[in-house]
Image: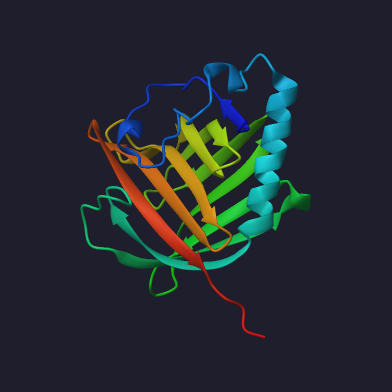
């Protein structure tokens, strides 16, 4: 049986329907197989496990590209980018730093546990800071989906800001990150595909 945690979204599922990484229906698993919010001990175990996977595999430098749309259906050209992960704060936080093709940093996400939850704070290039909480975790597929909670430093309700985040570790050397955003009342997605940089001896 898959180890899955499901949460009810804090706000609407805005733009998540277009994400390629949604895993609400897990083949071969009934609804009884999901770990519900009423089972905090099981949820804590899954949060601990997925955070261990993230901090065990992700640290280091990854090279790839981003495009608007989804991995299967990009709606723009691919642009080169790099992401680097670092574990900090005594192993309690994972920092995700994005840099452009010139090596300039442009956005950061910090993942951390919060008792029986997994949270992410995204420091966007648009200079706002959405806070999100893990709504769906699938350990077998190594997928974590985060839902919007609130946002700091937003200029106006129409300004661009992220409303969701999906992280899929496809293998020990491949990761896909998808952001769901909102601007002027319109939802959009942007996908990042990375391969881990090989360390030369």
In this rendering, is residue 53 above or below 26?
below
Q: Residue at x 63, y 50 (%)?
A: 54
Nearer-the-camera pick, 94 or 128: 94
Q: Position of residue 100 (x, y in %)?
A: 40, 67
Quarter holding the C terminus is bottom right
Q: Quadrant of residue 112?
A: top right
127 up-or-down from 6: above or below = below
- Can you give x and y, in whole percent of width and height, for residue 88 in the image? 71, 55
Q: Quadrant of residue 12?
A: top left
Residue extending furthest front?
Answer: 28
In the rendered view, how is the structure colored? rainbow
Give the residue at the far right of this rendering: 90
- In percent of the image, x 65 and y 42: which residue is there? 50
The picture quadrant where one finds residue 183 is: top left
In-front residue for pair 47/115: 47
Question: Do we see residue 163 in this rendering?
Answer: yes
Percent x, y for residue 3?
63, 32
- Is 119 on the left or on the right of 187, as rendered? right
Q: Is residue 114 visible?
A: no
**1 relative to 181, above or below:** above
Residue at (21% x, 52% y) in the render: 75
């Amino acid at each position: 049986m898959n180890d899955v945690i499901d949460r009810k979204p804090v706000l609407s599922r805005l733009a998540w329907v277009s994400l390629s990484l949604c895993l609400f229906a897990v083949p071969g698993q009934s609804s009884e197989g999901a770990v519900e919010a009423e089972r905090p001990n099981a949820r804590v175990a899954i949060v601990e496990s997925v955070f261990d996977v993230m901090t065990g595999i992700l640290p280091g430098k990854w090279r790839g590209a981003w495009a608007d749309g989804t991995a299967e259906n990009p709606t723009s050209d691919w642009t080169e980018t790099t992401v680097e992960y670092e574990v900090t704060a005594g192993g309690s936080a994972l920092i995700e730093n994005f840099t452009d093709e010139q090596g300039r940093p442009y956005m950061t996400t910090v993942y951390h546990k919060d008792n029986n939850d997994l949270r992410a704070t995204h420091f966007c290039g648009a200079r706002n800071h959405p806070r999100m909480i893990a709504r769906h975790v699938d350990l077998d597929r190594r997928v974590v989906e985060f839902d919007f909670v609130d946002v700091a430093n937003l200029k106006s309700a129409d300004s661009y800001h992220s409303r969701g985040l999906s992280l899929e570790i496809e293998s020990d050397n491949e990761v896909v990150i998808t952001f769901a955003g909102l601007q002027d009342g319109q939802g959009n997605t942007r996908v990042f595909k990375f391969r881990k940089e090989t360390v030369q001896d």
